[in-house]
Image (cartoon, grey):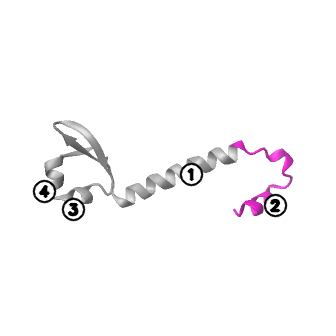
Amino acid sequence: MTSVSISQLKANPAAVLSSASDYPVAVQNRNKTAGYLVGKDLFEKMILFLEDIEDKKTIESIDLDDKGDFEEFAKELGI
């Protein structure tokens, strides 16, 4: 993982954001990680991944035995 100091981030934020497009960049303050910077594309991928996990949990928690035909149930859900 790439890391930058806060000074480097202040000096050239565009370059740091550019390098954070695919992988997080650790922002360090006095050689300790103060936070992580992620680019727009990576952030959106992370959100989609988390939404998928939540969708799977919801689907697994539904009791389909009393729903009848799955195709009809899927239409009710709009999927």
Tell me the kind of residue under disc 3.
Ala
Please state if 42 lies on the left or on the right of 16 as rendered: right
Amino acid of disc 1: Asp
Residue at mark 3: 14
The residue type indicated by label 4 comes to Ala
Per the model, the C-alpha gap separating discs 4 and 2 is 58 Å
Give the side of residue 71 with respect to residue 41, left or right: right
Write the start and end of the magenta stretch as one range: 61-79
Of the 4 image quadrants, the one containing the C terminus is bottom right
Q: CA distance from mark 2 to mark 3?
A: 50 Å
**Closest to the observer, 23 or 38:** 38
Nearer the N terminus, badge 3 or badge 1? 3
Residue position for label 2: 72
x then y, percent, for residue 32: 22, 35
Examine the structure image and report whether residue 34 is included in the region drawn in magenta: no
Q: Nearer the viewer, mark 1 or mark 4?
A: 4
Q: Secondary structure at mark 1?
A: helix
Q: Earlier in the sequence, mark 1 or mark 4?
A: 4
Q: Position of residue 10 (x, y in %)?
A: 16, 55
Residue type beneath disc 2:
Glu
The residue carrying mark 1 is 52
Q: Earlier in the sequence, mark 1 or mark 2?
A: 1
Disc 2 element = helix
- Residue 51's x, y, as percent? 55, 52
Q: Which mark is residue 68?
A: none
**First in sequence: mark 4 or mark 2?**
4
**Residue depth check, mark 4 versus mark 2: number of the one nearer the observer:** 4
Whether residue 69 is in magenta: the answer is yes
> What residue lies at 75% left-to-right and 59% top-to-bottom?
74
Say what secondary structure mark 4 lies in.
helix
**CA distance for labels 3 and 4:** 9 Å
